[in-house]
């Protein structure tokens, strides 16, 4: 799984990786050359009449090897950090682009908190492993194999003791990995849950305080935090045993080498003892290099399990193909028309349809309203038009063409969509209205004027260039709705969809806005989802939804006579006198 994610390395980074390997090989070679000079110095010191010049020469070569090792280590570390940073940037970009293409079905399946964790925490885990592991994972086996080759010709007793210690360390690594890998998978899921609880609390902070529910929310957060903490403590405790275990094995091996060496030197002939002593020093140095190599592998084992889980989670997002794809890109033969043909829709995993056999048509320039009780399926209906979801039965046609035949960008370019919850992005009023388009000052101001937002925007110190905080928190609900409507009007779409987008407006602003919309968008098809009768009185056609089915269609006056559901809604909002005069 982890190696699959390495395909996101660029060609330049692969070249840098190859250079890093060469630097590490040079570093290992220089480190393993130093014990040979140490053996020479030991032999010269133990041999009567040894020349000081030779001792100084060997010592100087050791210093040069140490200096060369330092330079190689610094260069390899720099390249590793650069590769890891570029790699993580590319992964984040891949995850973000994949999320951008997701339909609401994929967003519901992964959940927003999980996607945030995968884009941040999971990427960081992989970056950390790559920055450290690129050196350790290459250096450790290279060092171990090279050192084993160098000591294999020495006394078999030393080789056997080193082999037993290495086998013990490998066993420790495997046991630790098997113990912590499942827990790391759980940790990432618990991190998702912690993010979810925290996000819900921060988003609903006003409700929490209004109902004095701080203690309840704190208990929920504490439970999620405790779950994550317990799992983290388990993995931390298991990992904490690795270093002491390695140190115990390393010290035991060194003791065994010197114990065996003392026995061999004592049993050897006098003229062979100096050579055996030098061999023991060299073997001890190489054996320690082997142990240190496995100690570095321990560090890899600390980071690898969590990074492997993170790689799996990232690839799950990056490789998910959205169910809603571009159509063949057919060219429509009409402009500004909308039609539903026997449309049914069911949310993924739901037990029953939200919409059943819905059929109606809207001609160019008409204003059609959809009304119904809460849960009748109004928002689900409008979500099918820009293909936030696809109908599970029937057809939705825009300009006479099935929406599934459009390319998504082309379809959504024809539609101006104002969602039920007005959402503004951090930036300026202008950037929110233009929504990434480099529009003119006149176009922005015209959209604000039609949406009845020009008055309060002009009152701001910087006008359209005034800042907008995250979520539009520095504007009231009605102001956010008007700016959201201005964003849809700015695009001059063929079809305008208002999903209960006037609910936060007072009656005067609502009326002014609808009158201005009627004048400014003449010839534009409008679909209005509303709860207030006053918003849809003058619609060319009103569709009454009841439990996902069309209960009745007609004008306001016709529905007062023919639809029991509509009349109940009207009577709940208007007096008898108002009903007679509208």
Image (cartoon, helix red, strand yellow):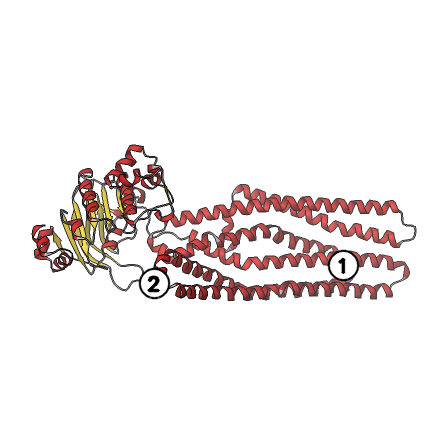
Residue nearer the viewer, 535 or 297: 535
- Distance from Cα at disc 2 to Cα at disc 1: 70 Å
Residue at the right extreme of this rendering: 49
Label 2 crowding class (10 Å Cα cut-off): few <14, some 14-19, many 20+?
few
Residue nearer the viewer, 307 or 263: 307
Q: Which residue is mark 1?
A: 284
Q: Position of residue 571 (x, y in %)?
A: 13, 58
Q: Secondary structure at mark 1?
A: helix
Q: Position of residue 220 (x, y in %)?
A: 42, 65
The answer to whether the residue labelled 2 contacts the one labelled 1, judged by CB atoms less than 8 Å apart, is: no
Determine the image quadrant of residue 234.
bottom right
Q: Secondary structure at mark 2?
A: loop
Question: What residue appears at the point 13 percent right and 47 percent down from the top-left corner?
Answer: 538
Residue nearer the viewer, 355 or 557: 557
Report the mark closest to the observer, 2 or 1: 2
Label 1 crowding class (10 Å Cα cut-off): few <14, some 14-19, many 20+?
many
Residue 153 seen: no
N-terminal label among 2 and 1: 2
Q: Position of residue 382 (x, y in %)?
A: 24, 51
Q: Position of residue 555 (x, y in %)?
A: 11, 50
Q: Which mark is residue 292?
A: none
562 vs 21, left or right, is: left
Residue 101 seen: yes
131 vs 105, left or right, is: right
Q: Which residue is mark 2?
A: 211
363 vs 215, left or right, is: left
Q: How many marks?
A: 2
């Amino acid at each position: 799984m982890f190696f699959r994610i390495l395909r996101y390395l660029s060609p330049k980074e692969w070249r840098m990786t190859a250079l890093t390997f060469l630097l590490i090989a040079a570093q290992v070679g220089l480190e393993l050359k130093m014990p040979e000079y140490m053996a020479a110095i030991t032999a010269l010191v133990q041999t009567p009449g040894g020349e000081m010049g030779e001792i100084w020469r060997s010592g100087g070569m050791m210093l040069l090897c140490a200096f060369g090792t330092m330079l190689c280590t610094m260069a390899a570390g720099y390249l590793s950090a650069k590769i890891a940073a570029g790699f993580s940037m590319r992964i984040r970009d891949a995850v973000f682009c994949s999320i951008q293409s997701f339909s609401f079905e994929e967003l519901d399946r992964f959940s927003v908190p999980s996607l945030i964790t995968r884009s941040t925490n999971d990427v960081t885990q992989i970056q950390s492993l790559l920055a450290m592991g690129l050196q350790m994972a290459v250096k450790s086996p290279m060092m171990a194999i090279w050192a084993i080759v160098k000591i294999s010709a020495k006394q078999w007793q030393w080789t056997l003791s080193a082999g037993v210690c290495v086998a013990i360390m490998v066993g420790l690594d495997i046991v630790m990995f098997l113990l912590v890998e499942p827990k790391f998978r759980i940790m990432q899921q618990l991190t998702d849950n912690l993010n979810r609880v925290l996000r819900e609390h921060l988003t609903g902070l006003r409700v929490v305080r209004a109902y004095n529910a701080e203690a309840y929310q704190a208990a929920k957060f504490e439970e999620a935090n405790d779950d994550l903490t317990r799992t983290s403590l388990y993995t931390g405790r298991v990992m904490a045993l690795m270093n002491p275990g390695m140190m115990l094995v390393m010290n035991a091996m060194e003791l065994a080498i010197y114990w065996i060496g003392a026995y061999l030197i004592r049993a050897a002939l006098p003229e062979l003892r100096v050579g055996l002593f030098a061999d023991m020093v060299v073997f001890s140095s190489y054996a320690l290099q082997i142990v240190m190599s496995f100690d570095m592998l321990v560090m890899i084992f600390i980071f690898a399990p969590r990074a492997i889980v993170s790689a799996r989670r990232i690839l799950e997002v990056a490789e998910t193909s959205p169910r809603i794809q571009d159509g063949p890109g057919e060219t429509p033969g009409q402009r500004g028309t909308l039609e539903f043909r026997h449309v049914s829709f069911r949310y993924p995993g739901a037990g029953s349809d939200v919409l059943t056999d819905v059929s109606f048509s809207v001609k160019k320039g008409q204003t059609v309203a959809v009304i119904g009780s809460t849960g009748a399926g109004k928002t689900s209906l409008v979500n099918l038009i820009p293909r936030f979801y696809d109908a599970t039965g029937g057809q939705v046609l825009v300009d006479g063409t099935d929406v599934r035949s459009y390319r998504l960008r082309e379809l959504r370019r024809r539609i101006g969509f104002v969602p039920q919850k007005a959402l503004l992005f951090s930036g300026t009023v202008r950037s929110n209205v233009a929504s990434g388009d480099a529009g003119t000052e006149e176009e922005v101001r015209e959209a604000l004027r039609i949406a009845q937002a020009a008055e309060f925007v002009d009152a701001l110190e910087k006008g359209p260039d005034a800042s907008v905080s995250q979520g539009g928190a520095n504007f009231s609900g009605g102001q956010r709705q008007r700016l959201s409507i201005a964003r849809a009007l700015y695009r001059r779409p063929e079809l305008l969809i208002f999903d209960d987008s006037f609910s936060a407006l007072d009656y005067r602003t609502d009326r002014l806005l609808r009158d201005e919309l009627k004048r400014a968008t003449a010839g534009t098809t409008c679909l209005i989802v509303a709860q207030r009768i006053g918003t849809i009185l003058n619609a060319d056609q009103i569709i009454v939804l009841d439990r996902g089915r069309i209960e009745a269609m007609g004008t306001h006056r016709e529905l007062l006579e023919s639809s029991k559901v509509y009349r109940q809604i009207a009577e709940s909002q208007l007096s008898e006198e108002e009903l007679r005069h509208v």
